[in-house]
């Protein structure tokens, strides 16, 4: 039983480190402190939209970014809106394998930030 937990934690750590190791991932997470579409993220950090979508997919799979819902774009299309799920990640390299600890964003913090933005 504990073996599967360890394997899951290792897989999780690997996915997070892999996603963070890709160019633009950290910039996307910084820009996604408030809900934004892929188009807005692409424009904010000045990267091609196709690259932005690839990084978003990797970050969502690693649990660092989440789709908060959908809204209408300026062109009238329904688009996904993303926000980061963490505020901090610490990586400990003192063991045989990297150990991650995350400071997750709370729903209360998201609501407060949304109210301040409006």
Image (cartoon, grey):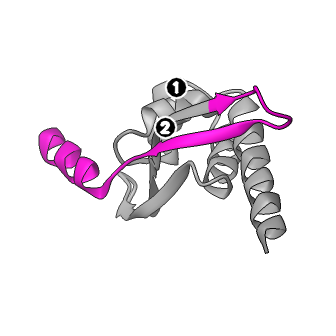
In screen coordinates, is 4 left or right of 43? right
Q: Which residue is mark 2?
A: 41
Dot 1: what SS?
Answer: helix
Verify CB contact (< 8 Å) between mark 1 and mark 2: yes
Q: Nearer the viewer, residue 57 or 3?
A: 3
Q: CA distance from mark 1 to mark 2?
A: 6 Å
In screen coordinates, is 25 left or right of 18? left
Is-magenta flag for residue 110?
yes
Q: Nearer the viewer, residue 56 or 7?
A: 7
Dot 2: what SS?
Answer: helix
Q: Which residue is mark 1?
A: 45
Count of numbered circles on the image? 2
Query: Is residue 22 among the parts visible in the rendering?
Result: no
Q: Quadrant of residue 31?
A: top left
Q: Nearer the viewer, residue 106 or 76?
A: 106
Specify the segment rendered in magenta. Answer: 91-118
């Amino acid at each position: 039983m504990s073996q599967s937990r360890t394997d899951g934690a290792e897989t999780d750590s690997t996915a997070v480190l892999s996603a963070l190791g890709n160019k633009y991932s950290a910039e996307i997470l910084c820009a996604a402190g408030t809900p934004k579409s892929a188009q807005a993220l692409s424009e904010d950090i000045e990267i091609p939209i196709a690259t932005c979508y690839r990084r978003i997919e990797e970050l969502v799979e690693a649990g660092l970014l989440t789709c908060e819902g959908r809204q209408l774009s300026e062109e009238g299309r329904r688009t996904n809106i993303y926000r980061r799920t963490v505020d901090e990640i610490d990586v400990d390299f003192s063991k045989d394998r990297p150990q991650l600890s995350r400071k997750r964003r709370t729903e209360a913090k998201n609501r407060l930030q949304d109210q301040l933005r409006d």
